[in-house]
Image (cartoon, rainbow, N blue to C red):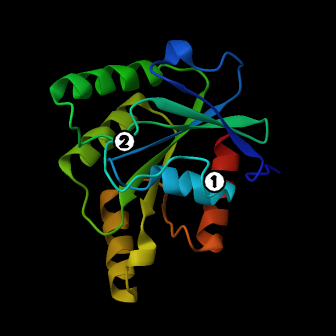
Amino acid sequence: MIDFVNAKFIKSAPSLDEAPLDNLPEILFVGKSNVGKSSLINALTKKKNLAFTSSKPGHTKLLNYYLVDDKFYLVDAPGYGYTRSGSKHLDSFGKMMEDYFDNPKLKGVIFLVDSRHSLGENDIDFYDFIVEKNIKFVTVMTKSDKLNQSEKSKAIKRGQELVHGEFVLVNTLNNKSLDELRTIISKLV
């Protein structure tokens, strides 16, 4: 059993070359800017300030490594789809991700999408990229705490129609959905 509370920040790295040198498995968190990657990492580990959260999109620019229970890394990737830095940042993000996906330590991807919205073009492009790379992944629909019951039903239906494979509707305030995601991550590791 993995103790997700036993988690700590290890380092930020601009590329796979500067990742931690041990051979522990890695689970990548990826999604659009401001989708809630850092908030979800904090909720999973029950630590309010483990991962930096910001109301401004595009804050994460590096791969952030969080060691969980000395067994694996949660890796928080920069968000896609928003940048103040322009196309140069988008090019470096694309290169960083292509290099990262050739990483033999990568055991799975947690692909985050906002449950309040349909998948955008960037989401679909990244989804197609993950499928093409043939990497295990689960789609996590975030921010479900901001939906009423009718909107949740619509989000679940949208998830079933748009996403092939496993998906989870997550609410960072609901421990049941967080436990479901912890179980999924443990199986990927």
Q: Residue at x 46, y 57 (%)?
A: 140
**Residue tagged 1:** 184
User: In the image, is residue 127 above or below residue 164?
Assistant: above
What's the residue type where badge 1 is placed? Answer: Ile
Q: Amino acid at mark 2?
A: His
Q: Quadrant of residue 179?
A: bottom right
Residue drawn at 67 percent across, 30 percent down: 25
Q: Which mark is residue 59?
A: 2
The secondary structure type at the circle numbered 1 is helix
Residue found at x 40% / y 52%: 54
Horizontal relation, residue 142 to residue 74: left or right: left
In front: label 2 or label 1: 2
Question: Which one is nearer the viewer's eye here, 154 or 63?
Answer: 63
Q: Is residue 9 left or right of residue 71?
A: left
- Can residue 147 be spotted in the picture? yes
Is tag 2's residue or tag 1's residue first in the polypeptide sequence? Answer: 2
Q: Nearer the viewer, residue 103 or 43?
A: 43
Q: Position of residue 120 (x, y in %)?
A: 21, 53
Whether 161 is drawn above or below 5: the answer is below
Residue 108 is situated, as x and y percent measured from the top left of the image, at 55, 38
Q: Mark 2 touching mark 1, by CB under 8 A?
A: no
